[in-house]
């Protein structure tokens, strides 16, 4: 190869590299691990030491016209991807997300302030059912652009063509699903423009149920608020999941009330109390059973590590009367 060809080839390679560099997206990785010690009263268990790890890969780039995109893949524990989504952020039409986990009304399942976990999220298996909407199936969500809305308001609309269809790989259909369950739609509003420190939220979900075992569509509703003043944050929320299943002794509805309060002692230390009371009613009119979880928690941050302790009391666990237990959970969480 003569010098002229070498110079030309070098220039071409340099140009291609520059273009590739300019066009390439970015990939970031974050994650963490949590080690726990759990002690539940009345349980005969083996080793109380547990561990969980999670990693999230986020790729991003930009399309012609200013639209940006992100791909997020979450890897939970050892074996499976627990969530994945593709989001297109447009300059004027908001964000369109193709999601296989979370989103919709599920983002409001428990909004109560806490030092560590939800009151039902410690080592005590309460079995309490919170709202989920279409999050259990592959769905598309539109998050409205903020410049179309009043200051402090966010709005999301999620739709699943088969609300019980689960998740599938590309080019696949179905993913299982319950017979007679059709499409589902969630609408979520969150507003923080009423007063300093006050946030209100609400959501509504409707899932089409067409089989003869149902006497109406499944509906889920959430209303709540949190208020922060100084180091103190308090919250309350109500939700109801009406199944409308016309079959004897099966669940007809869940109705939940949650309370929460947290106190930041300083920048590193937080104390919280949370309560979740959940009533389950059945179609046959049998007695309503209330499951309850109360949790007192402490969280202490040490930079990239957090030490958490939770003391949780559960009543009528799994909606079985007189099934009461206590649990103590100690957790060390590392983040990177």
Image (cartoon, rainbow, N blue to C red):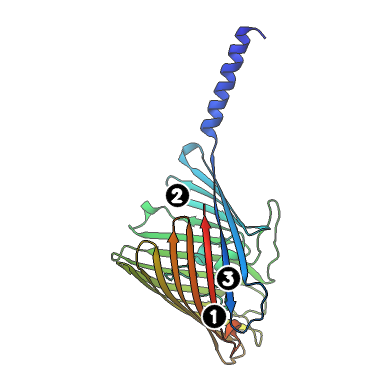
Give the position of the N terminus as an image quadrant.
top right
Q: Vertical placement of 298 versus 170: above or below?
A: below
Mark 2 vs 1, N-terminal side: 2
Point out residue 146 in the picture as x, y percentages from the top left corner.
38, 53
Question: Residue 303 versus residue 285: which sits nearer the camera?
Answer: 303
Q: Is residue 329 above or below residue 21?
A: below
Q: Quadrant of residue 218?
A: bottom right
Q: Residue at x 48, y 51 (%)?
A: 95
Q: Which residue is mark 1?
A: 254
Q: Give me the residue at 66% from left, 72% from top.
A: 47
Residue occupying the point 68% across, 70% down: 178
Look at the numbered disc 3 and give the secondary structure of its residue.
strand
Find the distance from the CA under tag 3 to the CA under tag 2. Answer: 47 Å
* Label 3, label 1: how far apart the Cα atoms are: 31 Å
Identify whether 236 is placed above or below 80.
Answer: below
Give the mark nearer the N terminus: 3 vs 2: 3
Q: Which residue is mark 3?
A: 37
Is label 1 in a helix, a strand or a loop?
strand
Task: Find disc 2 in the rendering and name its residue.
Answer: 93
> Which mark is in front, 3 or 1?
3
Disc 2 and disc 1: Cα gap in Å?
36 Å
Label 3 neighbour load within 10 Å: few <14, some 14-19, many 20+? some
SS class, disc 2: loop
Which label sits in the foreground, 3 or 2? 3
Q: Residue at x 69, y 62 (%)?
A: 175
């Amino acid at each position: 190869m003569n010098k002229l060809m070498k110079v030309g080839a070098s220039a071409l390679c340099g140009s291609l590299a520059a273009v590739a560099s300019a066009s390439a997206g970015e990939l970031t990785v974050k994650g963490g691990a949590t080690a726990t010690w759990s002690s539940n009263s009345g349980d005969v268990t083996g080793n109380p030491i547990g561990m969980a790890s999670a990693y999230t890969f986020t790729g991003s780039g930009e399309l012609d016209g200013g639209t940006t995109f992100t791909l997020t893949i979450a890897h939970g524990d050892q074996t499976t991807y627990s969530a994945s989504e593709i989001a297109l952020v447009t300059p004027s039409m908001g964000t369109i997300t193709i999601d296989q986990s979370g989103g919709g009304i599920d983002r409001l399942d428990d909004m109560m302030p806490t030092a560590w976990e939800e009151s039902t999220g410690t080592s005590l298996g309460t079995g309490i059912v919170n709202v989920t909407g279409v999050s259990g199936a592959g769905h598309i969500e539109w998050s409205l652009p903020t410049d179309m809305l009043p200051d402090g308001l966010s709005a999301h609309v999620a739709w699943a063509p088969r609300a019980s269809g689960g998740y599938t790989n590309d080019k696949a259909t179905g993913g299982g699903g319950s017979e007679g369950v059709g499409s589902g739609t969630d609408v979520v509003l969150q507003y923080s423009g009423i007063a300093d420190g006050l946030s209100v939220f609400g959501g509504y979900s409707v899932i089409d149920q067409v089989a003869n075992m149902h006497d109406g569509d499944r509906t889920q509703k959430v209303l709540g608020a949190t208020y922060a003043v100084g180091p103190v944050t308090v919250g309350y929320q109500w939700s109801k999941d009406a199944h409308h299943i016309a079959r004897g002794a099966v669940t007809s509805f869940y109705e939940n009330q949650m309370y929460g309060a947290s106190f930041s002692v300083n920048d590193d230390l937080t104390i919280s109390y949370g309560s979740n009371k959940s009533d389950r009613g059945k179609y046959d009119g049998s007695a309503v059973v209330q499951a309850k979880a109360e949790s007192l928690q402490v969280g202490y941050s040490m930079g990239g590590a957090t030490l958490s302790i939770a003391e949780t009391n559960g009543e009528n666990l799994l909606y079985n009367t007189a099934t009461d237990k206590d649990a103590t959970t100690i957790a060390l969480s590392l983040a990177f």
